[in-house]
Amino acid sequence: MPEGHTLHRLALDLTEAFAGQHVRVGSPQGRFDAEARQLDGALFEGAEAWGKQLFLRFEGERFVHIHLGLYGKLALTPYVAPAGEQGPPAPVGQVRLRLVGDRAFADLRGATACDLWTPAQVEACVAKLGPDPLRDDADPDRAWARISRTERTLASLLMDQSVLAGVGNVYRAELLHRHRLDPHRPGRSLRKAQWQAMWEDLVALMRLGVERNRIDTVRPEHEPEAMGREPRRDDHGGEVYVYRRTGQPCLVCGAAVRTVEVEGRNLFWCPRCQRPYRSRTGGSQHGGGRR
């Protein structure tokens, strides 16, 4: 599932491509046809993201809400119509939503949600979400209020969109590793200073993700050139410490990266860098996992 940086990048690109234009809106697949007819020819005012939710704003306070889910793709393609032809090429595959502007078109396929919403519906959706590290109006104390009062593990909390919006499986694993935190540690055991450091790091990492349109989390001293190693080759792209590196040596200490399922997703961590947390009573939080 795309993480928050992908949605924010899409919002920027869609705004640049269509804002201020009266766009053509269609649904070649037909599932969004009635809504598309209402929007066809309307002024596209801009796009914005909150966590993993994308909102396309049209004149008349109308919003297209999109959640890509696990399989959704929104492809933006520049084009110049050949002389004598009208518009971009015919859609390929199951295109649920097509936007056509002066110099680009965008096709949405496979999304979990694509709906026409009112401002009240947008507000109701946002009210259920935690702070988004990529938004200027984000309040990290809202997330801290939840984290600091629960026995739920950090690995679970970081994936909860009502606690923190936009963080997915990759940022979860990488943030915990960068801060040497046991993924199975309870939220209430975290100190406020630790949370503040994590938040600031997450803001920087996700902004870099928007800029590069990929997730990179390793520090300069662990880059391929600095370590004399081959660059990572993975369809997710980017340089990471533990994500999808089960059994491979940790880039920091050399221990084998482990994997365990948390909240229905594989969690990756280093057992040496992220030693089990021990409470003041001497107990430890242990999640086991595969080597």
Image (cartoon, rainbow, N blue to C red):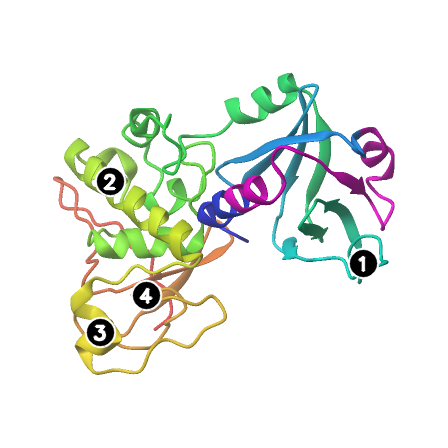
Amino acid at pointer 3: Ala
Q: Residues within 10 Å of mark 4 (few under 14, many from 20)?
A: many
Span highlighted in magenta in the image: 11-38
Residue occupying image coordinates x 75% and y 47%: 98
Q: Pick whichever of labels 1 and 3 is earlier in the sequence.
A: 1
Q: Which residue is mark 3?
A: 255
Looking at the image, tell me whether mark 3 or mark 4 is earlier in sequence order: 4
- Whether residue 252 is visible to the viewer of this picture, yes or no, is no
Circle 3: is it few (<14), some (14-19), or many (20+) Cα within 10 Å?
Answer: some
Q: Is residue 26 magenta?
A: yes
| Place of residue 21 in the rendered image (x, y in percent of width and height, measured from the top left) | 67, 35
Rounded to the nearest angstrom, the CA distance separating label 1 from label 2 is 42 Å
Quick one: SS at disc 4? loop
Point out the residue furthest to the front here: 83
Amino acid type at circle 1 is: Pro
94, 154: nearer the viewer: 94
Q: Quadrant of the C terminus?
A: bottom left
Secondary structure under the numbered disc 2 in the rendered image:
helix
Residue under label 1, please give it: 91
Name the amino acid type tagged 4: Val
Q: Is residue 138 visible?
A: yes
Indicate which label's residue lies in the foreground, 2 or 3: 2
Earlier-in-chain disc, 2 versus 3:
2
Query: Circle 1 sits in a helix, a strand or a loop, which is it?
Result: loop
Q: Nearer the viewer, mark 1 or mark 4?
A: 1
Q: Which residue is mark 4?
A: 242
For the point 41% across and 33% down, which residue is it?
163
- Looking at the image, residue 128 sits to the left or right of residue 99; the answer is left
Q: Earlier in the sequence, mark 1 or mark 2?
A: 1
The circle on residue 200 is 2
> Amino acid type of disc 2?
Glu
